[in-house]
Amino acid sequence: MEHQHQHNTMKMEHEHATMNHGAHHDHHAMMIADFRKRFYVVLVLTVPVMLLSKMIQHWLGISFTFSGDAYVLLIFSSVVFIYGGWPFLKGWWDEMKSREPGMMTLIGFAITVAYVYSVATVFGLQGMDFFWELTTLILIMLLGHWIEMKSVMGASRELELLVQLMPDEAHLVHGDHVMEVKTAELKAGDIILVKPGEKVAADGVIQEGSTSLNESMLTGESRPVEKQANDKVIAGSINGNGAIKITVTHGAADSYLSQVVKLVQDAQQSRSKTQLLADKAARWLTVIAILAGIATFLYWWLSGRELSFAIERMVTVIVICCPHALGLAVPLVIAKSTALSARHGLLIKNRTDFENSRKITTLVFDKTGTLTVGRFEVVRFESLQQGISKEEILKMAAALEGSSEHPIATGITGKAKEMQLTLPAAENVTAITGKGITGNIAGKMVQVVSPGYAGEHFKDAATATIQPGETLVYVVTDNTVAGFIALADQIRPESAGAIATLKENRIKTVLLTGDNKVVAESVSKTLDMDSYIAEVLPHQKLDKIKELQQQGEFVAMTGDGINDAPALAQANVGIAIGSGSDVAAETAGIVLVNSNPQDVVNLILFGKATYRKMIQNLAWATGYNIVALPLAAGVLYKQGILLSPAAGAVLMTVSTVVVAINASLLKVKGSGK
């Protein structure tokens, strides 16, 4: 159960992380300052209260009295009760109004009973007042709240770092001059200038210039990404050493970063199953506290002890039982985990999916593009004709393919660029539909064609052996096969490690792809995966996921989130991959910004770590009560062990701080980022 104070602090923490987060942040800081001020005022007043208390005088072996000293003690204690106790009394009132008794009800009730009884002793009731216990109790409760609120604020700092990635101002290009404008005022179609070292102020497309961008805070990708004209850029990424002009694609509110921040806030506020478990436990703990307090009071009072002793035991039991740590145990971990994962390119849209990632038994990798680079790259090229070098073969092919957007063409031109080859001029370039491309280079007719076309038209052509998973093209000069170029979708360097880590965690890996069996088998065997299902049409993927689930598997699926929507929804955990800026359109519970398979592994390991932290916190928050409650009730009174209300408050505060510190130790491991 979220008691009033904790509910407010957590609520504020979500609120202040919006784009205009400054005001909310100040509000939270004001609350912290308020508790700090109340703590210091009570600290000063506690000294005279202690000195005027008969019990303390007896302990210190001093004695001084003056006329009306009991009334002076009453006045100081009343100021502490009203001024220091105000947040707790107000919280109690709020909880009563909303009919959700919780933490504040317990504290408010405990301090009111102690105060009313002590006032009665001043005006004639037989017994010892315990004003000094009351003031120390309030003092420690204020300190506990002050520390705890700072911890809550710390948990939201990860999200704040995301918010701060967006610069306040941008350089708007207006004709031939540049003007400074607020980032929030940018709209689609505006052109902005980003100078070297500055943050990109809006999502957009580079219109002019080239540079390298550091996108690590947004995607978790640590290497700078090279960007040139027509490339997309994400708001919040840090520019390298080139100046670029960007055409804005959407305003600040719709930017990728804003969507991520909103996603994180939604996820932080969504009620996970573990949270609901904690709420239920906290509700029960409140009931137990009140019943245990009353039972303790009745036991001591009816067994002949004085009223003050019985009340003191009751107050201590109720204070120790406060479900404060329990109320924070899960929200703090949630706040930390969602924001931290967003900074590593793991966007949690559905908390339940994220928490369920620890149960995954089978991980289905959709299409080879996740485990492979997802684009054709030249793996080998040879000359089959004397007098022509293998480099010449690549040069001629790249010259013809220069203007084509075909994956094979971009693979060939990419390799030529990587080798820094100078390309000859090609003329009269035309496509042979579905078969290849032809043109003239230095007076020769040159063709780049498929093996099928080469076999048909050049009967005595030399041939090359095709390796599994390769695509081959022949380079033909003047109707003679001069050489070949083999291309393949390269396996990502991170894939093998990712699959191995999943095996260590007893998670089966299945490749589900529309690719042909040869490619699927090659990738699956190379990576030592458990199985593969090839040549699957998009609508059949759903059935394959169902089949695995019927075999008793808890299935996670990675897909691109658009044509895989039904299968992602069917999987127990749906992970959309490589969706870049289109975050909001995804159907999956979790979105990974990069197509890196290592991120899938990090997500599962981080899900497990987060769940562990929640359980640790819940165990601590409830476990300490099992020990402390009997001591507070006076079970070991005959052995001389008795907790005072102040000691109870110290224990309660310590338990809250332990929970807060434990939550803050959460880290994304194994990312290598």
Image: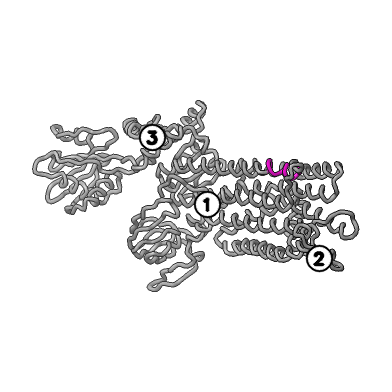
Q: Is residue 626 magenta?
A: yes
Q: Which residue is mark 1?
A: 339
The image position of residue 245, as x and y in percent, is 37, 64
Disc 2 versus disc 3: distance between alpha carbons?
91 Å
The residue that appears at 60% across and 46% down in the rendered structure is: 330
Of label 2 and label 3, which has the lower sequence position? Answer: 2
Of label 1 and label 2, which has the lower sequence position? Answer: 2
Of label 3 and label 1, which has the lower sequence position? Answer: 1
The foreground one among 390 and 612 is 612
As helix, strand or loop, the secondary structure at mark 1 comes to helix
Above/below status of 635 relative to 6: above
Q: Which residue is mark 3?
A: 514
Q: Which secondary structure is most common in the magenta stretch? A: helix
Type of residue at label 3?
A: Gly
Give the magenta-colored segment's residue range. 625-634
Residue reaching furthest to the bottom = 177
The image position of residue 124, as x and y in percent, is 91, 58
How packed is label 1: few (under 14 Cα within 10 Å), some, or many (20 or more)?
A: many
Q: Is residue 115 magenta?
A: no
Disc 1 versus disc 2: distance between alpha carbons?
58 Å
The residue that appears at 43% across and 34% down in the rendered structure is: 504
As helix, strand or loop, the secondary structure at mark 3 comes to loop
Type of residue at label 1?
A: Ala
Question: Can residue 287 be seen here?
Answer: no
Question: Can residue 542 be seen here?
Answer: yes
Using residue 395 as the reference point, say whether residue 307 is left or right of it: right
The image position of residue 383, as x and y in percent, is 15, 41
The image position of residue 548, as x and y in percent, is 48, 29
Residue reaching furthest to the right = 124
Q: Which residue is mark 2?
A: 64
Q: In the figure, residue 125 lies in which quadrant? A: bottom right
Using residue 172 as the reference point, say whether residue 390 is left or right of it: left
